[in-house]
Image: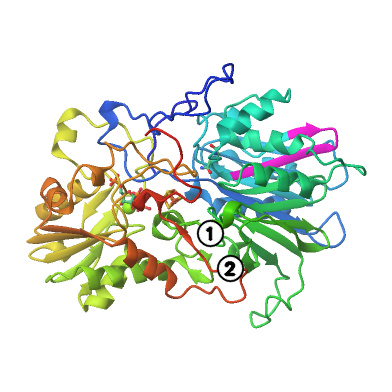
């Protein structure tokens, strides 16, 4: 993911002027310097949250810090700006062990740091900033010391009503040290709810109170001295799932419910579970508060959505964000992407020699397209794994050449071929043009672009940093114009209905509290909580 430094806060509300009308105008989400407009690609990711707790006697034999480290490494694709781990031994409510830093997980943690984090439970985070700058002060987990002991939180998502909640918290005399909505969540939990608490803090009641005040959007893990709460927003906008750590010698054939638990994990995605010896158990339901202790897990509450609004799981998790080996709604993300490709082949067939993909996330859809169309799949691009976010600005000459920096062409597979090239999404349209040029230079006779998602047209207020209206190429050009602009022989997108069909085809909703529903706001302009009163 390439990224640019963002504004400290995208809200223009002045905290001192809280008597003014309650309309909060957003500035463009991504203030991209003009000279970088052709450099930035894709959607910027969200965050990854992770938690782990050991069962039975403490101190545990499980290596909790290592488990969390592997857990957040598996969530690295969700955030590459900063990361952190906080652990507790379970005895002392005053002392949590904290290690956080800027950059990739592998640069932040070494053996010594991990050793110092020894504990029986802990939470971790990988961050892609949405609400405050990419700086150490905003890195997560956030830790605060309350009258009832320490509390740590890690958050994925973005509070749609952060501005008004922030005002409420400030009005109750709490000082905030950052503009992060995640710090806001942490401080909101520290405030006494209106109900009286006779025997110490009622954390589930506090969490419930927060959830009714701010129903969108988050998955949060909250750690106290000896327990972890996992919370998913009532719309189910962000993903969160539970895994069980089982003994290494447990037969694979033993059902997950019968396998003994050595510990429990909770994670934005399930992709890391196998590498830590955990088995996937289930998703956290929309609005559910799960409590994890050394004795096991239990649901302590379920908070309903306001006005019976529909569930709104981010459909872009399937399209692009999630790792393809993760499971949502009982189906693998890879299979959904494959299905999107099949659907795309039905909607927009092409006469061609081969089908190929823009790696990474376009590959599954390309296989689907190939299977449905009967065309042969062949790789045509080699991705340079060393091109990172800090890629040096090319000179004007190189920029004019439109060099496809991340890719090389496998010319023997391309020469003389009519090619269908699949990518999962087009955002600013910066990736595809240079690739087409590269493939033509390598001898492709025709290049037809098929995109396995509909055009992005609207902003996201739920944790994804979508460029401005003008920067979104789908708002400036229709498919024919875009094909001409990027030098393709033809270009077509998957329809919204086609995407929803692909997502629904094999999902397992049996035994669930409710049928699934999806947020498609960036494609359709239909927002889960109603159209926000925001300027874009
Ligand atoms: O239209 P644009 O603004 O150029 O962005 C679209 C591209 O960005 C993403 O890829 P990215 O390289 O970020 O990640 P990936 O390797 O996971 O596909 C996406 O998969 C498209 O290929
Ligand atoms: N991408 C995210 O989920 C970000 C979480 C939070 N809003 C932050 O900016 O830190
Ligand atoms: S607007 Fe788009 S990116 Fe944002 S939550 Fe909805 S589907 Fe996901
Ligand atoms: Mg891509």
Residue 388 % position (x, y) = 38, 41
The numbered disc on residue 481 is: none
Image quadrant occupied by the N terminus: top left
Q: Nearer the viewer, residue 115 or 340?
A: 340
Q: Residue at x 79, y 45 (%)?
A: 224
CA gap, disc 2 and disc 1: 8 Å
Is residue 216 something one can see in this rendering? yes
Question: Residue 147 lies in magenta, yes or no?
Answer: yes
In this picture, is 152 found above or below 58? above
Query: Is 198 situated left or right of 516 in this image?
Result: right
- In magenta, the rendered stretch is 144-155
Residue 442, by quadrant, is: bottom left
Q: Earlier in the sequence, mark 2 or mark 1?
A: 1
Q: Mark 2: which secondary structure?
A: loop
Q: Are marks 2 and 1 in contact (CB under 8 Å)?
A: yes
Q: Nearer the viewer, residue 105 or 323?
A: 323
In this picture, is 247 found above or below 454? below
Q: Residue furthest right?
A: 199
Is residue 410 something one can see in this rendering? no
Query: Is 65 situated left or right of 39 in this image?
Result: right
Residue 514, by quadrant, is: bottom right
Q: Residue at x 11, y 50 (%)?
A: 487
Q: Which residue is mark 2?
A: 514
In this picture, is 263 found above or below 228? below
Q: How many marks?
A: 2
Question: Residue 407 lies in magenta, yes or no?
Answer: no
Q: Which residue is mark 1?
A: 311
């Amino acid at each position: 993911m390439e990224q640019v430094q963002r504004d400290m806060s995208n809200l223009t509300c002045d905290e001192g002027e809280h008597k003014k009308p309650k309309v909060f105008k957003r500035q463009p989400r991504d203030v991209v310097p003009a000279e970088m407009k052709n450099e930035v690609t894709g959607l910027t990711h969200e965050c990854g949250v992770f938690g782990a707790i050991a069962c039975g006697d403490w101190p545990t034999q499980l290596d909790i810090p290592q488990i969390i480290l592997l857990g957040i490494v598996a969530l690295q694709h969700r955030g590459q700006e900063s990361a952190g781990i906080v652990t507790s031994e379970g005895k002392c409510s005053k002392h949590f062990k904290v290690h956080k830093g800027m950059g990739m997980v592998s640069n932040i943690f070494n053996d010594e740091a991990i050793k110092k984090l020894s504990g029986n439970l802990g939470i971790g985070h990988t961050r892609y900033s949405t609400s405050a700058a990419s700086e150490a002060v905003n890195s997560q987990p956030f830790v605060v010391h309350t009258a009832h002991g320490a509390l740590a939180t890690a958050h994925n998502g973005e509070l749609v009503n952060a501005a008004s909640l922030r005002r409420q918290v400030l009005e109750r005399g709490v000082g905030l040290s950052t503009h992060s909505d995640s710090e806001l969540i942490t401080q909101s939990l520290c405030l006494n709810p209106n109900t009286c608490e006779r025997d110490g803090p009622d954390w589930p009641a506090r969490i419930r109170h927060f959830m009714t005040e701010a129903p969108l959007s988050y998955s949060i893990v909250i750690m106290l001295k000896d327990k972890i709460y996992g919370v998913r927003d009532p719309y189910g906008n962000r993903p969160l799932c539970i895994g069980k750590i089982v003994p290494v010698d447990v037969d694979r054939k033993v059902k997950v419910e019968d396998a003994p638990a050595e510990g429990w994990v909770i994670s934005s995605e399930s992709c890391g579970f196998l590498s830590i010896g955990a088995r996937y158990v289930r998703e956290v339901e929309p609005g559910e508060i799960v409590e994890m202790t050394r004795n096991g897990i239990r649901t302590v509450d379920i908070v309903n959505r306001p006005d019976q609004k529909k569930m709104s799981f981010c459909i872009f998790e399937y399209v692009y964000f999630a790792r393809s080996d993760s499971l949502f709604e009982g189906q693998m993300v890879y299979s959904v992407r494959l299905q999107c490709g099949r659907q795309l082949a039905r909607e927009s067939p092409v006469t061609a020699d081969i089908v190929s993909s823009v790696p990474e996330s376009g590959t599954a859809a390309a296989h689907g397209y190939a299977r449905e169309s009967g065309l042969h799949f062949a790789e045509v691009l080699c991705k340079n794994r060393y091109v990172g976010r800090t890629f040096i600005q090319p000179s004007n000459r190189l920029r004019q050449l439109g060099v496809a920096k991340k890719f090389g062409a496998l010319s023997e597979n391309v020469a003389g071929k009519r090619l269908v090239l699949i990518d999962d999404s087009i955002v600013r349209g910066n990736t595809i043009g240079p690739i087409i040029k590269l493939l033509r230079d390598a001898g492709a006779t025709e290049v037809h672009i098929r995109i396995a998602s509909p055009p992005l047209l609207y902003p996201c207020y739920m944790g994804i940093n979508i460029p401005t209206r003008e920067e979104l190429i789908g708002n400036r050009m229709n498919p024919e114009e875009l094909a001409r602009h990027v030098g393709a022989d033809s270009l077509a997108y998957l329809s919204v209905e086609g995407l929803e069909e692909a997502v629904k085809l094999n999902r397992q909703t049996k035994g669930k509290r409710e049928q699934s529903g999806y947020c498609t706001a960036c494609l359709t302009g239909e927002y889960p909580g109603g159209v926000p009163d925001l300027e874009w």
